[in-house]
Amino acid sequence: MKTASDIAIAELRGELNGNVITPDHPGYDGARRVYFTGFDRRPAAIVRAADASDVARVVNLARETGAELAVRSGGHSRAGHGTSDGGIVLDLSAMNRVEVDPERRTAWAQAGVKAGDYTKATGRYGLATGLGDAASVGVGGITLSGGIGFLVRKHGLTIDDVLGAEIVTADGELLMVDEENHPDLFWALRGAGGNFGVVTRLRFQLHEVDVVLGGMLMLPASAEVITGLVAAAEAAPEELSIIANIVKAPPLPFIPAEQHGKPVVLAPMVYAGPADAGAQAIAPIRALATPLADTISRIRYPAMYKGPEGARPAADAGTNVLVDGLAADGTEAILEHLEVSTAAMPAAQLRVLGGAVARVPADATAFAHRAAKLMVNIAAMYESPDERPEHEAWVRSLAAALADDDAGAYAGFLGDEGEKAVLRAYPPATLERLVEVKHRYDPDNLFRLNLNVPPAGI
């Protein structure tokens, strides 16, 4: 027997400019997949929206039928928020146009464009907006959670370059928001955006970022190397941003065989300034140990997003903590946990903050942890669902060794951690304000597949 949702979805096909993919479609299995392949969910329909009018129609359908609504930009959610069992997936991947205004140094980007494609489009003019570090991440998702990438210390978070946005709210209305139009919603989008509607386009500030000193440095990992790297990154000019991944060395041809399986630091980095000054800034890091690999050279900035990203993992147990720095025994805790982990790929990722991030007032955006000096992202990627309790326990143990239980967190790297995650991502004053905005624009919590801020009364 067909439900009201079934009938409405059938009628929707004739109203959309995009495509509706249902379980009887030959491309259904591919269309329902997200980045973490272990989320094997079966939505009633996947709608690949072509434009904002399609988005509005889908939002109206979900509201009217009560269907669960999952919104997908790049599909990288650690908690699997980009898919649904029995609900509707609103897939924005076909909304991927970028319009660059090189004279004003601004760009409009649809929310489904990938970070690598956006950076390539703006890079034609020697311009860039700081995004993340993976080419396949959706611009909509990474922006609304904050955005911490290769330009973070020089130009701040991605949200610090957002000048405006177009968003379809729960009532199906398309709004233009910026500092003058719906300023409360504009504030909330920058750090907690998935809660308030479907952002269809974003307007970004661009910066002159063309030829940079960039690439990856691989060092053998020890307590001294990790401590020295963090210290060097903190002392470096703001033009240098580093993402230090502490992992077990994979069996790749360019890594000496005797190093396979041992802890290493994979550190992609960008110095967005003069090459001579960049070489001086990176020299103390190179001197920490004999590099196992060193690809750092003068490159055009979009080249940081080239190259394969590796196979998609099935699942990722993980969390993150925002701290003032590593405790005296923090590096040993990381190495000890890596040693005992049975995950296919356990990792601790260190991102030194400060610089432009810290100069923005804490109440200027929904991301309020501006004073944090270091983010530690903890991950254990694995294949079998049966392994989940073991790896989640490993993540909790390492997080506890590095920070207090109530340490702040970055929304974009949180998993399915419940209400506690919301309290860690948003300090009390920020959360109170978010609840008010949520109640105004989404009083029935239609947009709940996210790091959810429920409206008052729910």
Image: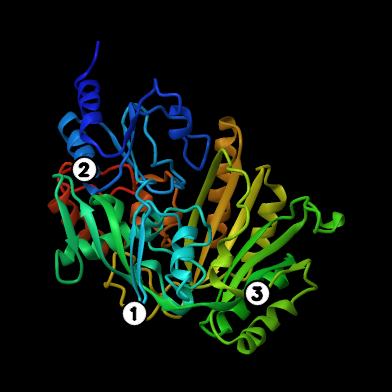
Give the residue drawn at x 15%, y 71%: 180
Identity, as a three-letter code, of the amino acid under mark 1: Glu
* Colour setting: rainbow
Query: Badge 1: few (under 14), some or many (20 or more) residues near its Cα, within 10 Å?
Result: few
Query: Badge 3: few (under 14), some or many (20 or more) residues near its Cα, within 10 Å?
Result: many
Visible in this render: residue 222? no
Q: Is residue 148 above or below residue 299?
A: above
Percent position of residue 409, x then y? 42, 60
Label placed on residue 445 = 2
Mark 1 → mark 2, Cα distance in angstroms = 41 Å
Visible in this render: residue 205? yes
State which quadrant residue 53 falls in: top left
Depth check: 424 or 63 in front? 63
Residue highlighted by disc 3: 229
Q: How many marks?
A: 3
Q: Residue furthest right?
A: 258
Label placed on residue 103 = 1
Query: Badge 2: few (under 14), some or many (20 or more) residues near its Cα, within 10 Å?
Result: many
